Every structure is written in structure tokens, then in C-alpha cells.
Amino acid sequence: MRVAIVHYWLVGMRGGERVIHTLLELFPDADLFTHVYDRKAVSDRITNRKVTTTFIQKLPWSKTLYQSYLPLMPLALEQLDLRGYDLVISSESGPAKGVLASSDCLHVCYCHTPMRYLWGMYHDYRRQVGSIKRLVMAPLFHYLRLWDVASAQRVDAFIANSKHVARRIRRTYGREASVIYPPVPVDAFDSQQEHENYYLMVGQLVGYKRADLAVKSFNRLNKRLIIIGEGDQRHALKKMAKPNIEFKNRQSFSAIREYYAKCRAVIFPGQEDFGMVPVEAMASGKPVIAFKAGGALETVIPDKTGVLFNHQTEQCLVEAIEYFEKNKFLFSRKACLDQARRFDSKRFKSEFIKLIDENYHLE
């Protein structure tokens, strides 16, 4: 079987790229296609493969300004020549599924989410730009939404990374999706260490992650918080934070593993489509204090592997942290680890192969 894997852009190793990492284990001879590729920012397993880029790669400052070229990406995808492939797997949360596959080729889309900036978070992004860009965005994004819905019909089968995203796919594209949770290498984490006196937050420092909520809450509680991540809000957050809050730049996996292993609990105040961070925390034997929405509803078990708070307010997060500290006896290392194993990489591989082999009759 000749396999092509299409990913929106390869400029870092976040959740989507880690799914690609695992798919390359399943399909060791697959070819990779993407809009923009930064060899220095991805794993060896990716750099050791043949990677074909679209013309977006050749545009000025493409490795940093790739999202600015979004209006050109539908055209760019349709220039990729995927003739001769038996299976095309598109990895979607940016434009990827709009490729033109042969009629006798199976196209499976693993959807992390329909594009946020076109759909659920459109008004948030629009509010953040200047008046001229805002004026251009309305007609341009209307066109992109029409293309996004039309290109969904090029997919034979959708896979969602959570039930939350499956509902979003149904509402956005009118398509049903199987649910296969993303792969988390549970055994790669250390679940045996005792905690030290700090809480941890890991992730990009961008608006929807709500690091500002964590900073305000820990300013008020005067408890130690370590935040690992980079993003456009980093400077403002550091300016806002009191000395009990530490910021760390991008860390190696071994360093992040150590921070997970020694924290008291992980703070997860944003709404994610799935969110690997809570599972990584539980794989480290640590509970999660998360906003009660999105993927956290499917990964965190209240009063067993974490605390879910109802509203994205400082007061709600403060109360959740105080509840956790008063009820530490409810949360066990074993319960966290048992829950994390439900999302292990081995499970992802077996479910993915089963979906292709049994449901779509590929040999």
C-alpha cells in the first residue's frame, strides 16, 4: 500500500505533530506532504522521511508567517500530485484535507478540529486585528468557509480526536466521525516521584489557553506556579505575574517530564479540543485542575484524577485549587496512571489500523 500523509504545517512538535510521529510508526514507508516545513523544529522521525511542500514554503518568511498565507492554502493543496497512492491520511486543524486524491484512493481525515479561525473562534481572532484587516477578513473568511465545507466532501471517512470534536465535525461539515483519541506515550513519563511544592502549566501562551487566568489566580493565592511555554502573550503575562510565578522557555522532553513528575498538580484553564497535557500529567501520576469543557470532560475524572471548574473566572479557579488542597486524599497516583493508559499510543495504533482494515476493507 502506498500511503501519503498530509499535515497542515510542520514547524514544531505539538499535539498534531505527535500524531504524525505515531502515524509514521504505523506506515514506515509513507510520504509526507505539508505547506511549510522547518527541519530544525521537528523530530528525527519526520526529518528522515521524504517531505514535499506546497508553494507556500517559498513565500517570504513562510516559517514564521505561514498563517498569514491561509487564503492561498486551498490553491496550494490542490497543486499536490497524489496520483498513485492507495491511502491518503490528512491531518486537519489547518488546511490539509482539501487535497485532490484519486477516485480509487481512500482518503481518511484525522481531524483535530475544524479550523478554529474560520469557525468557533472567528470572532475572537477578528477582534484582535486592526480595522483594515477586520474589513478584509469578513469576505475572505466567508470564501474560506465555503471552500472548507466543500473540501470536506473529498474525504471518505473522518476520524475525530474526541467526542467533542466529532460533534463539531457533524455541525460544521454534516459528516459523522469515528473517535480515536490521540496517542500519548504513557510509559515515557515518570509516575513514581513525590511532589514538590509547585503547580505546573504547560502550553502555548496564546489567548485561548487562558494562562492569564492562571497568573491572576496564583497572584491571589501566592502559591508557586511554573509556566512552560512561549507565545505572543508571554511578555504581558510576565509583567502581570508576581515573584511566586516562574516562566520557562521551550524545554526538552526530558526536562518537561521532570517538571510533570515533581509538581503537585497541573493547571489547565483553557478549552481544548482534546488536550494532551492532562493525559501527560496523569501519566506522571499527577492530578489536573481543568476548565470543565472540551476534551477535559473526556480525560479528567472529577474527585479521582482531578478537579473540574465550571467557569473561566479567577474566583472559580481559586476555589478549585483550594478544594484540591483540602481534599488531596481523593486523588491517587494509581487512579491517574490507570486513566492515562486509556489514551496510550498502543491503543491509538490498534484502533487506527482496525478502522482502516475492517471498516474500509484495505489489505
Image: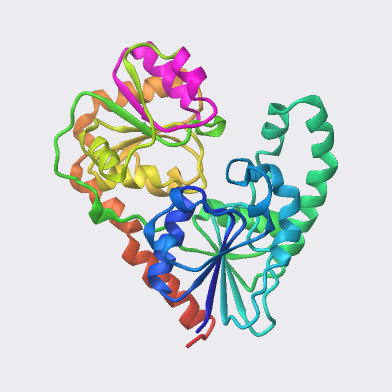
The x and y percentages for residue 222 are: 32, 12
Q: Which residues are magenta?
A: 210-239
From this view, report whether residue 87 is shown above or below residue 131: below
Q: How is the image coloured?
A: rainbow
From this view, report whether residue 282 is shown above or below residue 56: above
Please report the residue visible at 38 percent of the width from the left and 69 percent of the height from the top.
25
The x and y percentages for residue 10 are: 52, 53
Please report the residue visible at 29 percent of the width from the left and 39 percent of the height from the top.
256
Rendering quarter of residue 89: bottom right
Indicate left or right for 10 with 247 as reference: right
Please report the residue visible at 55 percent of the width from the left and 33 percent of the height from the top.
208
Rendering quarter of residue 54: bottom right
- The answer to whether one can see residue 181 in this image is no
From this view, report whether residue 317 is shown above or below residue 101: above
Q: Residue furthest bottom?
A: 363
Name the residue nearer the viewer: 313 or 237.
Answer: 237
Name the residue nearer the viewer: 343 or 98.
Answer: 98
Indicate left or right for 76 with 87 as reference: right
Please report the residue visible at 54 percent of the width from the left and 54 percent of the height from the top.
37
- The answer to whether one can see residue 264 in this image is yes
Name the residue nearer the viewer: 280 or 66.
Answer: 66
The x and y percentages for residue 237 are: 47, 19
Q: Is 232 part of what is drawn in magenta?
A: yes
The x and y percentages for residue 185 are: 30, 56
